Image (spheres, grey):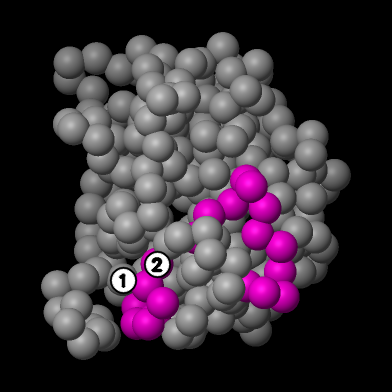
Amino acid sequence: MSQLPKMDHAVLLFLSFIISVRSVSHIDQLLYMQESALMEAVSQGIPESWTWQAGLRRPNEPNLFCCGVLIGSSWVLTAGHCVFAMRDFMPTSLIEVIIGEKDLRNKDGVATNVTEVFLHNKYDPDTQDYDYALLRLADPVEQGPLMYIRPVKLPSDELDFESGTVCFVSGYGAPKPGNNSFAKLITVQVPIASDDACKNAYQDRTITARMFCAGFEEGGADACQGDGGGPLVCKDGSNWYLKGLVSWGRGCAVPGSYGVYANVKKAMKWIRKITDLSGDEPEH
C-alpha cells in the first residue's frame, strides 16, 4: 500500500471512475455507461467485518455490481445509480442481497432477494443528486443474541460529523485496477473534507447539499470497481452511525480529488416515509 509523507499510519481511500475493457452481455451493454462511470471500490485497505455490510448481485454472475447497508431487518439502503439503469431490464426479484459476509468465498453470511426497489423520486443520473435507493428484502434478517448481523444506526437530527472527522468506508471492491476479485470485505479510514475543499476539487461539477467529500487531498490509495452504494460510517461514543453512501468520484488515486458521497442525513425524511424507521435507533 502506498503511503504519504507524515501519514505513515493512514489507510487511504479514493473513489474513482473506472472504464474497464471486458466482454459484456446484452444487459451489461445497456448498463455499461452507468456502471463504468459510477462503480467504485475500496482498495489498499484492511480486511474488516461490519455487521451491516451488504452486497448486490445479479443472477448467474459471480461478482457483485454494487454494495449497500442494512438499516433495518427488512431494508437495505444503496445508491440510486446502482439500480437506476437496470429497472426496465431486470425483474426486482432477481437482485440478490448478501449481508454480513466477511469473505464472499466462505458463503457464511445471509442471502436473500428483493421484493421492491424504491429509487428516490428526485434522483438525477446526470449530476448524481439524490443518489439514494431502498431495497425491501424478501426475507427479514434475523437478529438475536447469537446472530452477528446488526443494522447500522441511522443519523439523528441532532448528531452531525464535521469536516476532519475520520470515518470508515467499506466494500468488496477489487484490490487494484484491472483486478476483478470481489471477495474480501475491505475497510479504509477517510477524513471528511470541508465543503470548500470539496467544491474546489470539483469546480467542473455541481456539489449539491446532498453530497459531501471524504479522503485525502494528497491522494495515495487506489480505488477500483465494486463499491457504489457502500456505507461510510462514523463513530460517536460506542455507536457507529451511517454518514454517507459511496456515490461518485474522479480518477484513480489522483491527487486533488476526493470521494463524493450521498449524505444520508439529507434523505432521512424520505427514508422514514418508506420504511417507518427513525434516525439513531434502527429497527430491531
Residue stretch in magenta: 202-222
Whether residue 139 is visible: no
Q: Nearer the viewer, residue 23 or 267?
A: 267
Measured Cα–Cα span from mark 2 to mark 1: 7 Å
Residue found at x 55% / y 81%? 251
Question: What residue does disc 1 label?
Answer: 12
Q: Nearer the viewer, residue 99 or 209?
A: 209
Residue 256 vertical position relative to residue 181 in the rendered view, above or below:
below
Which comes before the other along the chain, label 2 or label 1? 1
Q: Quadrant of the C terminus?
A: top left
Q: Nearer the viewer, residue 33 or 62?
A: 33
Amino acid on which disc 1 is placed: Leu
> Does the stretch in magenta take in 210?
yes
Viewed as shown, does residue 27 lie left or right of 225? Answer: right
Residue 98: percent from left, percent from top: 44, 40
Judged from this view, the residue extending furthest toward the right is 88
Residue found at x 48% / y 81%? 256
Neighbor class of circle 1 (other Cα within 10 Å; few <14, some 14-19, many 20+) is many
Tag 1, which secondary structure?
Answer: loop
Question: How many numbered tags mark residues here?
Answer: 2
Residues tagged 2 and 1 counted as in contact (Cβ below 8 A): yes
Q: Nearer the viewer, residue 153 or 149?
A: 153
